Amino acid sequence: QVQLQESGPGLVKPSQTLSLTCTVSGGSISSGGYYWSWIRQHPGKGLEWIGYIYYSGSTYYNPSLKSRVTISVDTSKNQFSLKLSSVTAADTAVYYCARGRGNCFDYWGQGTLVTVSS
Amino acid sequence: DIQMTQSPSSLSASVGDRVTITCQASQDISNYLNWYQQKPGKAPKLLIYDASNLETGVPSRFSGSGSGTDFTFTISSLQPEDIATYYCQQYDNLPSVAFGQGTKVEIK
């Protein structure tokens, strides 16, 4: 059973960089056919796709966030990471990591709340 | 960008009722449409992929249909444990992904 777990600071100051890591267990992040994604949900709101990465390192980002987002992968640790720069209060959200299969997301982490505040 | 319009935004139904949610795409997305269930405080759960395929382990009272621009998600007999928010998600415009606005389902 594949499991994903987000980790990282729950509080980030405005203008700083939000950094989160997703640890994958029960399966190799290097296995073909899957991609590794970040999705967020503002409090009480809907879901917003941030981007995803293949184990090869190829990345695709939401155009609305592209200038501030970097997703990377560490196959040796079976982890992938999100960096979101120049954050504001509008980036306060629950951040989920998820596994992409075909064109859907079949496994999700439990989510982690990140608050942007001084 | 492809826009997704999901309706209704909320609904209230009785246990045993048939519940239907629709999702409309602003352009043809073939069958590239998925449905998720999200319970409060939990991550979304994949229910239906490629418009009509039931994800493994998901009860058969859940179903999906449609292609092109118009899609429907149905719960054939609403159960108390189905109280949740349901989202559609499209991916035709790869490498971009978009979710619908969500439908909150409550028990009457």
Image (spheres, grey):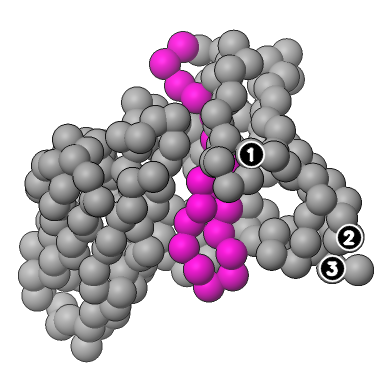
Give the amino acid at mark 1. Lys
Q: Quadrant of residue B83?
A: bottom left
Give the amino acid at mark 2. Lys
Was residue B82 drawn as part of the magenta stretch in this picture? no
In the rendered image, the vertical position of residue B59 relative to residue B14, given as above or below: above
Is the residue under label 3 in contact with that under label 2 (CB below 8 Å)?
yes
Q: Which of the two discs, 2 and 3, labels the residue nearer the N terminus?
A: 2
> Foreground mark, 3 or 1?
1
Q: CA distance from mark 3 to mark 1?
A: 22 Å
**Relative side of A115 to B58, left or right:** right
Q: Mark 1 Cα within 10 Å, few/some/many (few <14, many 20+)?
A: few
Q: Which residue is mark 1?
A: A66
Q: Which residue is mark 2?
A: A13
In the rendered image, the vertical position of residue B26 relative to residue B78, given as above or below: above
Q: Quadrant of residue B101?
A: bottom left
Q: Magenta segment range?
A: A32-50
Q: Secondary structure at mark 3?
A: loop
Q: Say which residue appears at 79% left-offset and 45% top-offset.
A: A85
